[in-house]
Amino acid sequence: MALTELMRTLEEEAAARREALLAQARADAERLQAESGADLTRRRTAALATKGAGLRAAAARAIEAARQKAARRLLETRTGTLERIRRKVEARLAERASDPAWLPTLAGGVKLALEYVGDVPTIVEAPGPLLEYLRGTMAGLAHVTLEPARDGRRGLVVRSADGSLTVDATLESRLARAWPRLAIDLAARIEALR
């Protein structure tokens, strides 16, 4: 009987040991599953944070690109508007240059330019109608020679005969000199209207 008793004791111990090992295995499995879930949650959170940062950076780049495109369009539109205004001004100046009512104003510009040159021999280039008007008003100035304007210029050029001084008072050059300031003023007015 001792053998049977020994067998039964060994079987009970083996069963108890098996149950203890199973309980330990279940506990380890639950612990691993919990750790795995926490690790998975951490990795998922990290991946979502990385993806979110990438999306925010891409959105910021897209917004900046859109801002730059809008600014470029605004500048192109403003430049186009200013160019159209300049062409209209040039056309009106061309019309005005041949207006007989404006001849006294242009002649006043000649007198002002002659003050810069002084009493040295001087050449005044002017377009046809202004040239004829000046012949009548400047007959007493022996040091001044009147010549027709070159290249179809509107307005006048006054220069000393030796070429040391030139006063370009053509409408084209006056507009070219004044345009940067005028363009800034016009751009500010256009912006104020928006």
Image: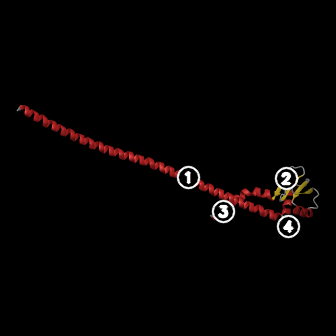
Q: Which mark is residue 64?
A: 1
CA neighbours of label 2 inside 10 A, class few (<14), some (14 to 19), many (20+)? some
CA gap, disc 1 and disc 2? 50 Å
Say what amino acid the circle numbered 4 marks. Answer: Pro
CA neighbours of label 3 inside 10 A, class few (<14), some (14 to 19), many (20+)? few
Say what amino acid the circle numbered 1 marks. Answer: Glu
CA gap, disc 2 and disc 3? 36 Å
Relative image position of residue 122 (x, y in whole percent): 90, 54
Comparing marks 1 and 2, which lies closer to the viewer?
1
CA gap, disc 3 and disc 1? 25 Å
CA gap, disc 4 and disc 2? 25 Å
| Foreground pick, 183 / 11 | 11
Residue at left 74%, top 62%? Answer: 88
Location of the N terminus by quadrant is top left
- Provide the secondary structure element on which disc 2 rests: strand
| Foreground pick, 184 / 19 | 19
Location of the C terminus by quadrant is bottom right
